[in-house]
Amino acid sequence: MAEYICLFGKDSAAIVIKQPKKSPLFLRMIVLVFAMVCGLYICSVCLKQLSNVSFQSSQLVQTTPFDSHSLRFVTRIHYPKPQTFNRAECGHNPVRYFAILSMQRSGSGWFETLLNSHSNVSSNGEIFSVLDRRKNISSIIQTLDRVYNLDWFTSASKNECSAAIGFKWMLNQGLLDNHKEIVDYFNRRGVSAIFLFRRNPLRRMVSVLANSYDRYAKLLNGTHKSHVHSPAEADALSRYKPVINSTSLIHDLQETENSAAKALEYFNTTRHIVVFYEDLITNQTTLKQVQEFLNIPVKDLSSRQVKIHRGDLSDHIKNWEDINKTLNGTEYEKFLRADY
């Protein structure tokens, strides 16, 4: 609205009309539209990151080997000073810390031998399989400190000039029970987590039962072997066909998936990636991406281990008809089919 000002003098009177001030409504609309666009963009980015690793149709699905945290955080480098030896000329070489988080019979042993074939990687095995090392959080922290300080010696130790130091840790070895303290340790020390799962938990179940049987049967000349290095040994072990409890099968599959989901939830704030056993077999770029995640030179990796249970699952389960009947028509039906 126009504003009128009247001025009266001795000799004259005047009326001055001021132009109305420009309404702030237009500017407010611009700010509002800009804020809405920014909000939509941020939401789309968050949704995209959350969709990288998700549980869908009772199967852990990942659209890319990297999740948001592997892309968001840069690997921290370290210059450890071990108490048991001198790194000498390698003392100025940076070291990355990692841990392979997995479940028994998920391919972690084979995956670890692949990593250890790299001249700059030392992965020290399943160190928390020993109960005393995980009896409480204090013993866990002490063990972790020894590993990452290069004071842990195994056949895989390259120590002086290692560029990446780690080990494998099963979810049921105190990892989930002490997750808060371990997540804090990983974030504080800059430890990167590599989750290794199987897309098909039914195949994992066959491997678990067969390996458990061989602990007592010792099918290879009276010796128990969890991993083999020849086709003849693999064929000998694969002849045993376990019987799977069809009554509890669906519940057991759900428990496996729930454990994986819980681990991902607990360690969501760490720098991590999710790798699938099946992808390591079928996708040539998966190992390259793991090496890039660890920020180490990319090399061709190899392992002497030979896969034991190959081919269709129907060849490896004694009560196949019962299992087929139990899972057909359920969300787990896809696990009956060969997936690699």
Image (cartoon, rainbow, N blue to C red):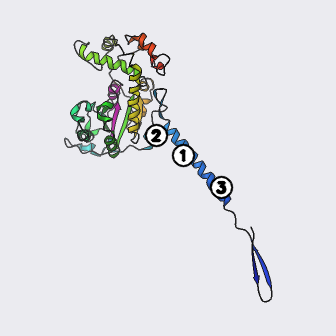
- Disc nearest the viewer among 3 and 1: 3
Marks 3,2: beta carbons within 8 A: no
Residue assigned mark 1: 42
Name the amino acid type tagged 1.
Answer: Ile
Q: Amino acid at mark 3?
A: Met
Of mark 3 and mark 1, the one earlier in the sequence is: 3
Q: Position of residue 36 (x, y in %)?
A: 60, 49
Residue pushed farthest right?
12
Where is the N terminus found, in terms of image quarters? Answer: bottom right
Out of 330 and 338, give the one closest to the viewer.
330
- Residue 235, how many percent across, how many down? 33, 12
Image quadrant in which the C terminus is located: top left
Provide the residue designation for mark 3: 29
Indicate which label's residue lies in the foreground, 1 or 2. 1
Q: Circle 1 sits in a helix, a strand or a loop, which is it?
A: helix
Name the quadrant containing residue 310: top left
Alpha carbons under labels 3 and 2: distance apart: 34 Å
Left or right of 315 on screen, residue 88: left
Q: Quadrant of residue 203?
A: top left
Residue 116 part of the magenta segment: yes
Q: Is residue 306 visible?
A: no
- Tell me the element at label 3: helix
Is residue 38 something that shows in the picture?
A: yes
Query: Disc 2 designates what residue?
Result: 68
Question: What is the secondary structure assignment of the residue under circle 2?
Answer: helix
